[in-house]
Amino acid sequence: MTTVLEKIARQLISRTSFSALATKRAEDAIVDTIGCMIAGMNDASPRSIATAFANEIKRDGPSVVFTGGRASRSVAALINGTAAHCLDFDDNFHPARAHASAVLVPALLSIATSSDDFSGPILVKAYLAGLEAQASVGFGVIPSHYNRGWHGTSTIGCIGAAAGVAVLLGLDEPQIANAMSLATSMASGPKGQFGTGAKPLHAGIAGRNAVEAALLAQAGLTGRLDILERPQGFLDLFGGDEATGWTNLSWDEKHIIETRGLVTKLHPCCASTHRAIDAALDLQKEHGFSIEDIQRIDTKVGRSAVDNLAYPDPSNEMQARFSMQYCLAVALTNGGLSLGDFTPQAAIRPELRCLMAKINMTSYSVEEERGVERLPHQVHISLKDGRRFSTERLHANGSIAAPSNDGQKLAKFEDCLRWAGLSTAHITHSDLKAICSGKSVRTITDYALQVLNRHFRR
């Protein structure tokens, strides 16, 4: 009987071409993630890892490290994956409940920057393969796996990214399946780490493990190909009470990036806050009230969102990213959020505490969520003059249902550069997009990093 991993590997091999839309969305995701990596280069989390592995970072190592220098493919993926995710500005992928690109892009770049053999189009193909693999693994366990407390970025993300790296390396169908099997033995990461430096480390660990799993499969190491569905396998141990398994797994003619897409973040904080933020800003724009007019704000979100947003009174910038109260208060005060709102000083601004105390969060019940993949997040705002406004959001801005426009993409890219002490005078969005079409990913990436490191604020 054909196993789930074999079916996924066969699907990845059989999809030999991609539409212009799928290619464009993949290129946009790769550039968006590199922007997040640039912004995250000086964050404490990737810097700590770079310090821990300083003896492995050299000028002539195989793979580019965005914090500076070059290292082994494994260490490069570890540091760059952490940098991509440390500011929580990287995209979301609902079919896997994962930060798909923060794992995939650093893992793929660690291979693609180690040799001149990898072109931009090959990188894009491998990205799309890894994304489809993440969706396929997620099909059998989401949302139960995530609700149980597993961080899909570091579990499902690791397994799917291993397939993407295997495709980049040109491995055959059995080797792709074995890469995913080996990655399953490496998959871990509890959501209880949210609000700490270990959370972005999850993306780095997943990227590193994906690279190592693919290289091990290339070298001939094998695992059980039924490890997703067998007793004491992934579904059994990680699935959760309502996981359905892969019996009905199938694929559309269109790629998952076309049918479901990614959510490109427009706010640098936990995605569990985004629909409420967008809904509240919708109400503020429509009705023109100020924060001084607000008597009370009530939000109703999913159960997993309440679990994620564990800091109603954050004491630092990491916790602030996982605080509905903080993120909503800043958004309604400033008309949005930027990376500058997440510093140690900004996170404890006393002037925000008054509004934060008026913000309440509740969740849907188990029965309300049963059998439903996604419910809208609701916002109810009561004003001091007695008026009350309500709305809800099923999708955040940046999703394919409410796509970001070119101006928003550029504004985000400029925010990332500004956070790193750079500007478009140093490097442009188009410069990075050339990585996806050039003959050598290594050559273009090396040039971009040389420019950045000449001007980067250390």
Image (tube, rainbow, N blue to C red):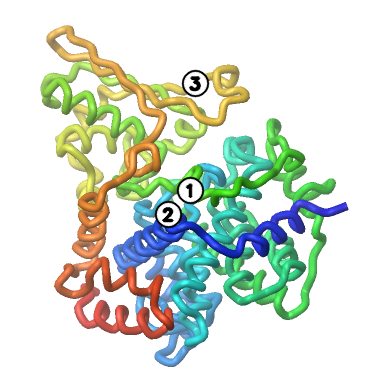
Left or right, residue 123 beside residue 298 = right
Q: Earlier in the sequence, mark 1 or mark 2?
A: 2
Q: Which mark is residue 21?
A: 2
> Residue type at mark 3?
Tyr
SS class of the residue under badge 1?
helix
Q: Residue at x 35, y 23 (%)?
A: 392
Q: Nearer the viewer, mark 3 or mark 2?
A: 2
Q: Earlier in the sequence, mark 1 or mark 3?
A: 1
- Give percent across and percent down for residue 434: 34, 73
Nearer the observer, 260 or 280 = 260
Q: Which residue is mark 3?
A: 364
Q: Earlier in the sequence, mark 3 or mark 2?
A: 2
- Give percent across and percent down for residue 220: 77, 77
SS class of the residue under badge 3?
loop
- Give percent across and percent down for residue 47: 38, 70
- Give percent across and percent down for residue 451: 24, 81
Q: Mark 1 touching mark 2, by CB under 8 A?
A: yes
Left or right, residue 57 beside residue 157 = left
Q: Nearer the viewer, mark 1 or mark 3?
A: 1
Considering every residue shown, the one lying at the far top of the view is 386
Q: Which mark is residue 258?
A: 1
